[in-house]
């Protein structure tokens, strides 16, 4: 009986700092499941990307959007932005954690980085609004 009571007292004792488990980055945010994508360039009359993106659902991606200030330009892609989970947008060292996104706009030269997880498989795009040329659009497939 003494041993049973001692075992119960030890089990019920509060945990010390050294007994607490430590948690590191795991899963999709653990770093081993992260890919960098080519940047999107917003410049008057220039193609915005080198080619289409092929993404894998469940993978964490980062890409930069660079505006050269040659013209006020935006990038829209509401269907694409609803098919991903945006972890953060970084602008000049400021981290923004939005619940959603429809578009971004550059009124002057600048750069932003977007980190996200691809979620919903399908075919999507981002483009410069008001344009119809293929060079002002990037096709995106999530598998």
Image (spheres, rainbow, N blue to C red):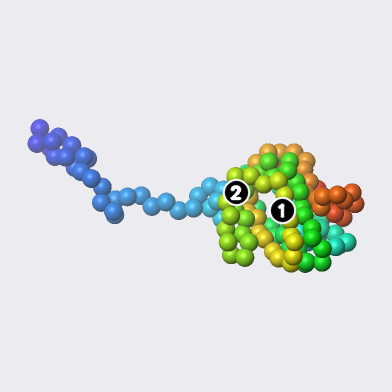
Quadrant (top left/top right/bottom left/bottom right) for the C terminus:
top right
Alpha-carbon span between mark 1 and mark 2: 12 Å
**What residue did someone put label 2 on?**
98
In the rendered picture of this protein, how many numbered marks are placed on residues? 2
Instruction: Determine the secondary structure under disc 1.
Output: strand
Residue at 78% from the left image edge and 46% from the top image edge: 125
Q: Residue furthest top?
A: 1
Question: Is residue 33 found left or right of 25 in the rendered image?
Answer: right
In percent of width and height, residue 34 lies at: 62, 54
**What residue did someone put label 1 on?**
104
Question: Is residue 60 found left or right of 143 in the rendered image?
Answer: left
In percent of width and height, residue 46 lies at: 86, 62
Q: Residue furthest left?
A: 2
Q: From this viewpoint, is residue 113 visible?
A: yes
Residue at 78% from the left image edge and 66% from the top image edge: 69
| Circle 2 Cα neighbour tier, 10 Å, few/some/many (<14 / 14–19 / ≥20) | few
Q: Residue furthest right?
A: 133
| Circle 1 Cα neighbour tier, 10 Å, few/some/many (<14 / 14–19 / ≥20) | few
**Front residue of this view, candidates 62 and 98:** 98
In percent of width and height, residue 86 lies at: 62, 48
Q: Where residue 117 is drawn, which disc sits there?
A: none
Instruction: Determine the secondary structure under disc 2.
Output: loop
Residue at 57% from the left image edge and 51% from the top image edge: 97
Which badge, 1 or 2, comes first in the chain's sequence?
Answer: 2
Residue at 32% from the left image edge and 50% from the top image edge: 20
Which image quarter: residue 115? bottom right
Q: Is residue 15 above or below residue 106?
A: above
In percent of width and height, residue 25 lies at: 49, 53
Question: Is residue 40 found left or right of 89 in the rendered image?
Answer: right
């Amino acid at each position: 009986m003494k041993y049973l009571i001692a075992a119960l007292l030890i089990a019920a004792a509060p945990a010390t700092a050294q007994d607490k488990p430590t948690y590191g980055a795991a899963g999709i945010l653990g770093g081993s499941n992260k890919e960098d994508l080519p940047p999107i360039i917003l410049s008057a009359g220039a193609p915005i990307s080198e080619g289409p993106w092929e993404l894998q659902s469940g993978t964490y991606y980062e890409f930069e959007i660079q505006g050269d200030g040659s013209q006020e330009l935006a990038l829209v892609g509401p269907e694409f932005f609803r098919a991903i989970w945006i972890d953060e947008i970084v602008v000049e060292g400021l981290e923004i954690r939005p619940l959603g996104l429809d578009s971004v706009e550059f009124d002057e030269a600048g750069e932003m980085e977007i980190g996200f997880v691809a979620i919903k498989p399908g075919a999507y795009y981002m483009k410069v609004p008001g344009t119809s040329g293929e060079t002002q659009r990037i096709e995106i497939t999530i598998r």
